[in-house]
Image (spheres, rainbow, N blue to C red):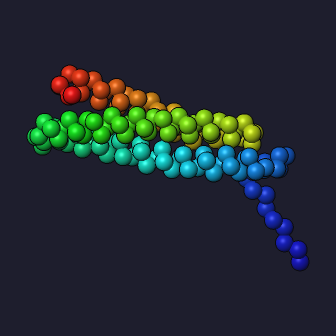
Amino acid sequence: MSREVEPDIHTPARKPAGSLDRALFRIMRMLESASLFLVSFSLSVGALYIIGNFQSFLDRSQFMLLLVLRGSSFLSVLVTAYYLAFLVMWMFRRRIFVLPRIVYATTSIVLLLMILFGAAYLDSVFGGA
């Protein structure tokens, strides 16, 4: 009895994966993990800032949270933009389309840009140095 191997649904049969494709995939996955971590961190710091407004945190603590929020959201936008670029390159090389990852990356970039501009606005209005 011979056992047939099912084809991998993520790898099209018409184009074998080369070393460049594997490298792009590895880089893309590392950037995806870093992006997910930074997005989660930025959202957590933003939530902590909002909770701090209701809990009457010290002004100095609020400014520090704004500074951390601006830095983490800026870094997150950069990493997510690189992730989106590597994802598009990988999809063109493999001739496949992965809609959920594109939706995640674009939504993250838009959300984090709004957070970044909001934090910069709050920092400038309320007198951060």
> Can you name the residue that lies furthest to the bottom here?
1
Q: From the top left corner, tell me how far across and down residue 116 is, in percent.
A: 35, 30
Please say whether residue 39 is visible from this viewpoint. yes
Please say whether residue 103 is visible from this viewpoint. no
Q: Quadrant of the C terminus?
A: top left
Q: Which of 56/22 is in front?
A: 22
Q: Residue at x 37, y 40 (%)?
A: 72
Q: Quadrant of the N terminus?
A: bottom right
Q: Residue at x 58, y 49 (%)?
A: 29
Q: Which of 74/114 is in front?
A: 74
Q: From the top left corner, tell me how far across and down residue 86 is, in percent.
A: 62, 39
Q: From the top left corner, tell me how far across and down residue 11 is, in percent.
A: 75, 51
Q: Quadrant of residue 122?
A: top left
> Can you name the residue that lies furthest to the right here?
1
Q: Which of 117/19 is in front?
A: 19
Query: 82 left or right of 68?
Result: right
Q: Quadrant of residue 54?
A: top left
Q: From the top left corner, tell me how far across and down residue 25 is, in percent.
A: 66, 48
